[in-house]
Amino acid sequence: MKNQRSKKVSYLAGMALVCLMLFSVTTAQAQEVTTTADTSFVVKGTVSDENGPLPGANVILKGSSVGTASDMDGNFEFPQKLKKGDVLIFSYVGLETQFVTIENQNSASNVTLKLDSGIEEIIVVGKVATKKVYSSKKNKDN
Amino acid sequence: MAQISDFKNIDFKVADNVAKLHKGSDLNNLPLLAHNLTFDLPTDVEKFRAIYTWVCNNIDGDPKQDNEVIDKREEYKNDSVAFLKWNNEFKKTAFNKLFKQKKTMCTGYAYLIKELSFLADIECEIVDGYGRTTSTNADQLEMTNHSWNAVKLNDKWYLVDATWSSGYFDDYNVFINEYNDGYFLTDPILFAKSHYPIDPKWLLDASLEDKPFVSSPMVYSETYKHKILPVSPNEMHLSSTRYAEIEFSFKPYKNIELDKVSMMQYKGVKEKPFKIYDLKNEDGLIKFKYKFKYKKLYDVHLKIDDDIVATYTVDVSDGREKTY
């Protein structure tokens, strides 16, 4: 009988502990939410090239598939709040891809994409990969 | 030597399946494509593999662009300013074609590999140089005509050629997509048999850098597919005398059955095999011998199964010394 009571007590104590833990967890979570709310922010800006505002440029958060594209006037608003240290990747066909590290909400307010210097000169060959077999006669004709 | 066998404990099936999963993705958002192809893969070599096989199997070779650039290079060969001006205009068309129709030529393949690697934090360079084929740069370095890539994995540079991995043009100049794994992280010594960079440092092998370009036996995409390295004779054009014994040898990177090895010449369109002898595998080097009987110029083709993997020319004289 005595034994049973002490079991009950320890059961109650256990429940209390669990409640306490749950409570502390929720407060910890709440704290986390408030800290991110403090440091994350909306990032907006304009993408342009040498000719002015650039519609249709891709903006994506590095390491994720979250992204958007610039509108007709080259403006964009990133669909997810960002924090300091996040990297946005700006890209457009034929223009050099640019990485922008976010410091504050104005970090990407004006992004200018340069012409891609990756292809300085296009060098190619006629019919590189054919299934032709070498022949002395044919090569002498050339 | 930096080559694919460095990664023999890695199964590329997972990376290849990731690439297949994204078959048909468009090129309008390269950062997203790079992310999709790589985020699930644990190692750089697998990330690079997914990028490589995706590019090889989703981009088509464009014979029109090849020919157009060749023509213009010929036309403007004495006027580099005019060529550059044309080239800058052409670049826009080429980019449009690559991104809208996914058709390109070698520089486009090399550019995509580099750009997607860069977006996946993998160091990769475009290497320009001389591609050696039956019709170009066979005997000497005539014209820079090709681009490929060097990629840095685990602090080592490796060589790849996405253009030649992607497929070939058939007799009607139609592009056939047929992935050839032989140009992926190829042994630099084998790679150099058909790729000679403008900057010799991209040979990736000091022993190759010091030597002048040698017209070595003609190799084919099948040479890379079967992964064999012609060793001796080391030149394509040989001279010999009647009944003189010539020893041929090549190094297989993977096991090859001796009964699959043969040598032949064409009589018209028919193949006529040579009766080679002393065929053996000696310490990983496959060797055999042959004596040419007639005074003539032979085109001699080495075969593995049904594929021609190397070509020599043998100019056989009657053996009597000429006096001048």
Image (cartoon, rainbow, N blue to C red):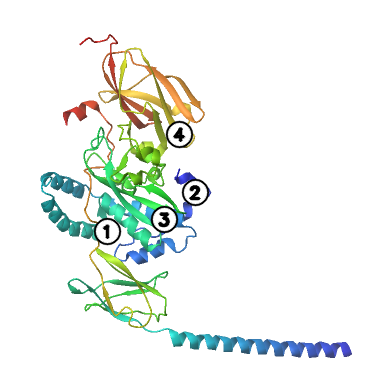
Nearer-N-terminus badge (3/2):
2
Q: Is residue B173 shown above or below B45?
A: above
Q: Residue B7: which disc? A: 2
Q: Amino acid at mark 3?
A: Phe
Chain label for disc 4? B
Q: Which circle, 1 or 2, is nearer the viewer? A: 1
**Residue at the image point whose x is 60% and y is 86% from the top:** A25
Q: Give the spatial CA distance, label 1 vs label 2.
A: 29 Å
Q: Which circle, 4 or 1, is nearer the viewer? A: 1
Foreground residue, A101 or A25? A101
Q: Amino acid at mark 4?
A: Pro
Q: Give the spatial CA distance, label 1 vs label 3.
A: 19 Å
**Residue at the image point whose x is 37% and y is 48% from the top:** B160
Q: Give the side of residue B76 with respect to residue B177, left or right.
A: left
Q: Secondary structure at mark 2?
A: helix
Inspect this view and state whether residue B178 appears: no
Q: Give the spatial CA distance, label 4 vs label 1.
A: 37 Å
Q: Secondary structure at mark 4?
A: strand
Label 4 belongs to which residue?
B252
Q: Residue B48: which disc? A: 3
**Residue at the image point whose x is 29% and y is 43% from the top:** B168
**Contact, CB < 8 Å: mark 4 with mark 2?**
no
Label 1 belongs to which residue?
A118
Instruction: Name the image quarter holding the C terminus of chain A.
Output: top left
Residue B12 percent coordinates (x, y): 47, 51
